[in-house]
Image (cartoon, helix red, strand yellow):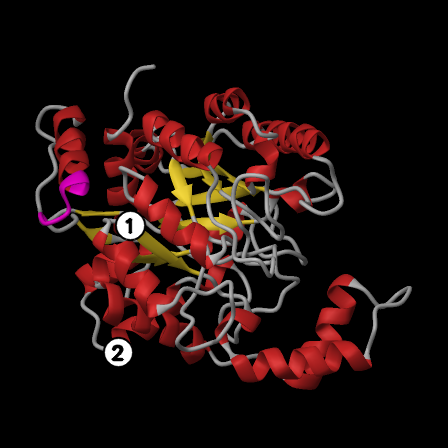
Amino acid sequence: MDMTRRQLASAGIAVAAACTARRQESAPKGEGRTEQDASPRHVIDLHCDTPMLLRGGDYDLGARNSRGEVDIPRMREGGVTGAFFSVYTSATRNTELEALRDALEIIDTVGREVDRFPDEVALARSTRDIEDALDKGLIAILLGVEGGHMIAGSLAVLRSLYRLGARYLTLTHSRDTAWAGSSGSEGNRGLSDFGGSVIAEMNRLGMMVDISHVSDQTFWDTLAASTAPVIASHSSARAIATHKRNLSDEMIRALAESGGVVHINYYNTFLDGDYARRSQAWNAANPARPGFTGPARTRAKLAAIGRPPLDKLLDHFDHAVQVGGVEAVGLGSDFDGVDGELPEGMQDISMVPNIADGLARRSYTEADIDKILGENTLRVMADIESHASPA
C-alpha cells in the first residue's frame, strides 16, 4: 500500500469533502482535481513528546537523528502529514507557576525550530491550516498542552495558551490538580466546579478536551460537562492491557457516542500486561546508576526482555474499532515520551506504514485505514472548532 498517496476521502467524512472542494476551487483553470486524482493522505499523530528533545538544544528536527523517534526525514519516510507536539512539564517537580514558565519556553522552542524549516514544516492551529500545509507539501506541526497544572488555575492562562497555538489540553498528568483527578492518583477524584468552567471555556474556544491521564471519575464528569466531542490523545484499551491509563470498553463506547476519538498509545507497558510485569521485574533488578540511564538502560532492558510484537499494538486498534466503531480511532504514539519502549516494527515515526499494512492484513479497507490514520482526527477537530463562539 502506498503510504504517501491516497484517493480523495470518502464522501461520508464531511470535513474531508469540504477541504477537497476548496482544493478544486483554488486550482488554476484547467487544472481542477477529479476523484481519480491521487493526493497525499492525512496521517496525523496526536501525541509526540519531541519538544523535550528540542528544548535541550542539541536535537535537530531537520536531520535524521540516531536518537529519538521523530524528525522531519523520518516523518517524511512515514508519510506523516501532521503531528501534535506535546508541551509537557512535570506535575510533580514544579510548582504550577514554574510549569507555566516551562510551557511558554517549550512553545517558544517549537516555534523557533519550525521557523528553521519553512520548506518542510508549518505551525498549524486549525483543520484549515492542516489542509493548507498538505496542499503546499508541508508537514503540519500543532501543539497540545499535556497537563492542566500548566494553566495555573486560571482561565486567562488557558485562553493565552490557546492564542499561542495550543489546540488541546490534557486535563491532568501524573497527579491531581485542584480541579481534576489524575489516573496517577489513588483517590479517583472528579471535576470540581472550576473544572467544569475549564471544560466550558475550552468548548467556547474550540479547543479539544483531552481525557488521557485523567481518573475514571474525571472521565465521566468531563463527558457529562462537555457540549463538544472529547478526545483521548494517547490512550489504549484496558480490556487488552489492564492499566489505569487505558480506557475501559465502557469509556471507549461513551467517547465514541459523543463523537470523540481515542488515539491509540504505542507504549509497551500500556499494550502488553506480560511486558509490563517483565519490565517491572527488570527495573527492580537493574536500578539506574551513573552511565546506566536513559537510552543505554532502555537498550539493555529491551535486549533482556524483548519488545512486544507489532500485532499487540494492532490488537488495541482493532479492539477500539470493534467497541467504538472505525470513526472513533486514531494515532497517538507517545513517541519521544516513553524512553524507546515501543513494539517491534514501531520503533520510530518512519514505521507508521506498518500500522496501515497490518490493518490491511486484518481486512480493513483503504477508506477505513484512512479514517484511522488521520481523517477521524480532522473530523473531530472540525466538529470541536464548530462549537467555538465569541466571548
Identified at 26% across, 50% down, the residue is: 376
Give amino acid for label 2: Arg
Identified at 60% across, 61% down, the residue is: 186
Which mark sits nearer the N-terminus, 1 or 2? Answer: 1
Proximity of marks 1 and 2: CB atoms separated by less than 8 Å: no
Judge left or right: residue 133 versus residue 293.
left
Quadrant of residue 132 within the rendered picture: top left
- Can residue 76 be seen at all in this image of the molecule? no
Residue 32 position in % (x across, y down): 11, 33
Identified at 44% across, 32% down, the residue is: 198
212 above or below 197?
below
Nearer the observer, 80 or 34: 80
Give amino acid for label 1: Gly
Residue 147 in the magenta stretch? The answer is no
Q: CA distance from mark 1 to mark 2?
A: 24 Å
Residue 8 position in % (x across, y down): 16, 48
Q: Which residue is mark 1?
A: 260
Identified at 27% across, 78% down, the residue is: 361
Nearer the observer, 73 or 295: 295
Secondary element under disc 1, as helix, strand or loop, is loop
Q: Quadrant of the N terminus?
A: bottom left
Nearer the observer, 66 or 259: 259
Judge left or right: residue 145 versus residue 297.
left
274 above or below 138?
below
Q: Nearer the viewer, mark 1 or mark 2?
A: 1
Write down the region rendered in magenta: 11-16
159 above or below 147?
above
Q: How many residues crowd mark 1 within 10 Å: few (<14), some (14–19), many (20+)?
A: many
Secondary element under disc 2, as helix, strand or loop, is loop
Q: Which residue is mark 2?
A: 362
